[in-house]
Amino acid sequence: MILQVLNEYYQRKSRMLDSDLAPPGFEHKAIPFLVVLSTDGGFVGFDDTCEGEGKKKVAKTYLVPQTIKRSSGVAANLLWDHSGYVFGIDNKGKPKRAREQYLAFVEAIRTRFSECNDAGIRAVLAFLERADFSKVQEHPLWTEILESGANLTFRLEGEAIPVCEREVVIDALSTANEKDLGEQSLCLVSGEADAIERLHPSVKGVWGAQSSGANIVSFNLDAFNSYGKSQGGNAPIGKRAVFAYTTALNHLLAKGSKQRIQVGDASTVFWCATPGHPMEELFPGFFGEQDKDNPDQGTSAVSTLLNAPKSGVGSFEDDGTRFYVLGLAPNAARIAVRFWHVKTVAELAVNIRKYFNDFRIVHAPHEPETFSLFRLLVATATLGKAENIPPNLGGDVMRSIIENLPYPQTLLAGAIRRIRAEQEVTYPRAAIIKACINRYSEKEELTVSLDANNMNTAYRLGRLFAVLERIQERASPGINATIRDRYYGAASSTPVTVFSTLLKLKNHHLAKLDNKGEAVNYEKLLGQIMNEITDFPAHLDLQSQGRFAIGYYHQRQAFFTKSESTNKGE
């Protein structure tokens, strides 16, 4: 189904007047240098298309014939390639192979454009057949071209576009592709008769995969073959459908694409059945990192969605348009499908709104109202590093959000594990714990802010621990380490082993307070919290440790929040 939907996306998008998808047989490729020729095939010079400075230089992108699939053999791209193919000269120390590449490059142009009477093609062939590259090697840019192995293509002097973008060349190549379809069979994607593609073009842009690209459909060992079929014959997909799905996917994954985000190790792309739908623009603001060019994108997107039911504008509640979310992860020389979700825009809007409500919790004024999904995942990772996020966690969380399912146990465990390791209940970790526990219990067991009426023992013990720490801080201003640094792990997992000691220490700390009224207030608060605690548990399970963390976090926030009342959560 994934390939079918991508094929449909290409067909719809390519019919639009402002479509930036490549036509059949072509692709958009960064070409750093253009070989400028006169109409009689004379060498005029090189054009450097790169813009920027130093390592940030970026080559201009052109429409070129689609990349040839090659491994170790000689196979020339049409009208563009590196210097070994274009001139038969490279710095790899294999002149014989470079010569073979050059001959293959010239022959490919002759064969493909044998019936095309175009001035650009004639100039290119005249230049290549003359094979006098002495002026090429004397040019100031030659050393850089040779050392970088950069791709090159041709441009006629006085023209703005390269030869491969000339309309007559595009038409000639498209016609030739139709003639070369060969023996036809039934395509599994389109359901129509088409020539079956043996090797599918590479998909590029998946984070962590090979820079040259990788494949979703690939068979390269006998163990993967069936019924005597080899390579693409095991999954018979026509050439037209293969071009469509790979072009669409490369377009969505391209650098600078507004329809991709990173979710853990999964490069995630999304699109709507109706191109240009508002949800396509809003979606990255819900889950993606902050856009440097548009820092308010996420806040604006979330605000639009959350306020929609109140304002009645853009609520999407009755929008039955299909929305697709595809997560791809690297797997050696292939690409693994990490997740694939299909929802209506209405279903998606409702579930994302629930997700943001789940993660709402009291926080400091300077902290953001919402987090990107990446920031939530990083909060559970060792040292706060992206590479330490468990491989499947991002996909599991995304599935829970989109399908409105309980959040994965590994998310809750990760947040609690980092709290115990670092003795710090941070805002994102508290939000994760609250969201996970409330989804498990299927009710708002944990509120946004302090809930004095919550009688859960673990929650109350967390509050108690926060009050004891606060008393210590008030008794010894500027103290470097509090009871949290030494006792949090034990207090949150085996309360019976530490709370008797902490309550004895509390008496010593209260005695040091100069303000006796403050001491009395703390005693009253401790009495209110301990009123429903009949005994200290010997052990708290994972979810109870989460409730302990939220109780501690709520109480700490209440100390620093000016509030009319903390008797009732929001």
Image (cartoon, rainbow, N blue to C red):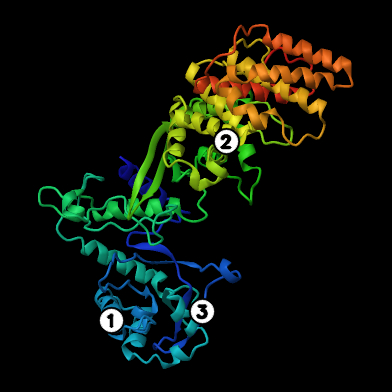
- 189 horizontally vs 498: left or right: left
Q: Residues within 10 Å of mark 3 (few under 14, many from 20)?
A: some
> In the rendered structure, which amino acid carries the disc numbered 1?
Arg
Q: Position of residue 199 (x, y in %)?
A: 25, 58
Q: Secondary structure at mark 2?
A: helix
| Residue 285 sits above or below residue 131 on the image | above
Q: Position of residue 215 (x, y in %)?
A: 32, 54
- Mark found first going from the N terminus, 2 or 3: 3
351 or 449: nearer the viewer: 449
Dividing the picture into quarters, in which one does residue 558 lie? Answer: top right
Q: Residues within 10 Å of mark 1 (few under 14, many from 20)?
A: some
- 225 horizontally vs 405: left or right: left
**Residue shown at 66% from the left, 16% from the top:** 500
Q: Nearer the viewer, mark 2 or mark 3?
A: 2
Q: CA distance from mark 2 to mark 1?
A: 58 Å
Q: Nearer the viewer, mark 2 or mark 1?
A: 2
Q: Which mark is residue 493?
A: none
Q: Position of residue 380 (x, y in %)?
A: 54, 37
- Mark found first going from the N terminus, 3 or 1: 3
Q: CA distance from mark 3 to mark 1?
A: 27 Å
Q: Which mark is residue 47?
A: 3
> In the rendered structure, which amino acid carries the disc numbered 3?
Asp
Q: Secondary structure at mark 1?
A: helix
Q: Secondary structure at mark 3?
A: strand
| Residue 360 sits above or below residue 39 on the image | above
Residue at numbered disc 2: 421
- Mark found first going from the N terminus, 2 or 1: 1
- 556 horizontally vs 101: left or right: right
Residue at numbered disc 1: 97
Q: Note whether residue 58 is visible.
A: yes
The N terminus is located in which quarter? top left
